[in-house]
Amino acid sequence: MSVYCTVPLPSPGLAETSSLLSSLPLLSPRRLISSPLPSPQDNCESCFSKDFCTKCKAGFYLHKGRCSEKCPEGFAPLEDTMECGEGCEVGQWSEWGSCTRRNKTCGFKWGLETRTRHIVKKPPKDTIPCPTIAESKRCKMAIRHCRRGKT
């Protein structure tokens, strides 16, 4: 049995008609189908074709023609459009820096050491946050007395 369906395309006046072979049993004209046929994408509100969604139902994010509850890794949810946007790409962490306090490496018992990484690729929208690019941790400083004007 062939099932024909017309799918509206994004441009006004255009439509795509496709034929889908189905393993549905033949029904007599007097028999009514009580439930709709399952869609390949049940979370899709409108589509370009049977395999490509253009708008998802509420609570789902659109990514490359598919609807899902979460965006894939490397992509961030855009709440205003309910799409998955490319996320921020960051480089590798640097080595931990020297243990310092008030920009000095002497005169204190405890300090902080810091490491950083750079943003390799900024996201297309400012609404997508980048991960942390600097982090610090507590460290024990070498016991040294500071000389005047020295660090």
Image: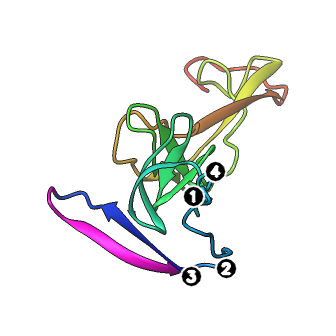
At numbered mark 3, what does the secondary structure look like: helix, strand or loop? loop
Q: Main secondary structure of the magenta part?
A: strand
At numbered mark 2, what does the secondary structure look like: helix, strand or loop? loop
Please give the name of the residue rendered at 35% of the width and 65% of the height, measured from the top-left corner. Answer: 6
| Alpha carbon distance from label 4 to label 2 | 16 Å
Which class describes the residues within 10 Å of circle 3: few (<14), some (14-19), or many (20+)? few
- Asked whether the beta carbons under mark 1 and mark 4 sit within 8 Å of each other, the answer is no
At numbered mark 4, what does the secondary structure look like: helix, strand or loop? loop
Of labels 1 and 3, earlier in sequence is: 3
Q: Which residue is mark 4?
A: 35
At numbered mark 1, what does the secondary structure look like: helix, strand or loop? loop
Q: Amino acid at mark 2?
A: Ser
Q: Which residue is mark 2?
A: 23
Q: Of the residues tagged 2 and 1, which is closer to the observer?
A: 2
Which one is nearer the viewer's eye here, 26 or 117?
26
Of labels 4 and 3, earlier in sequence is: 3
Of labels 1 and 4, earlier in sequence is: 4
Q: Is residue 115 visible?
A: yes
**Number of marks in picture:** 4
Image quadrant in which you'd find residue 104? top right
Q: Which residue is mark 3?
A: 1
Please give the name of the residue rendered at 63% of the width and 50% of the height, measured from the top-left corner. Answer: 35
Measured from the top left, where is residue 145 in percent x and y?
A: 76, 20
Q: Amino acid at mark 3?
A: Met
Quadrant location of the N terminus in the rendered image: bottom right
| Alpha carbon distance from label 1 to label 4 | 16 Å
| Alpha carbon distance from label 4 to label 3 | 18 Å
On the picture, is 70 further left or further right than 141? Answer: left
Magenta part of the protein: which range? 12-20
Q: Which residue is mark 1?
A: 41
Measured from the top left, where is residue 18 in percent x and y?
A: 39, 77
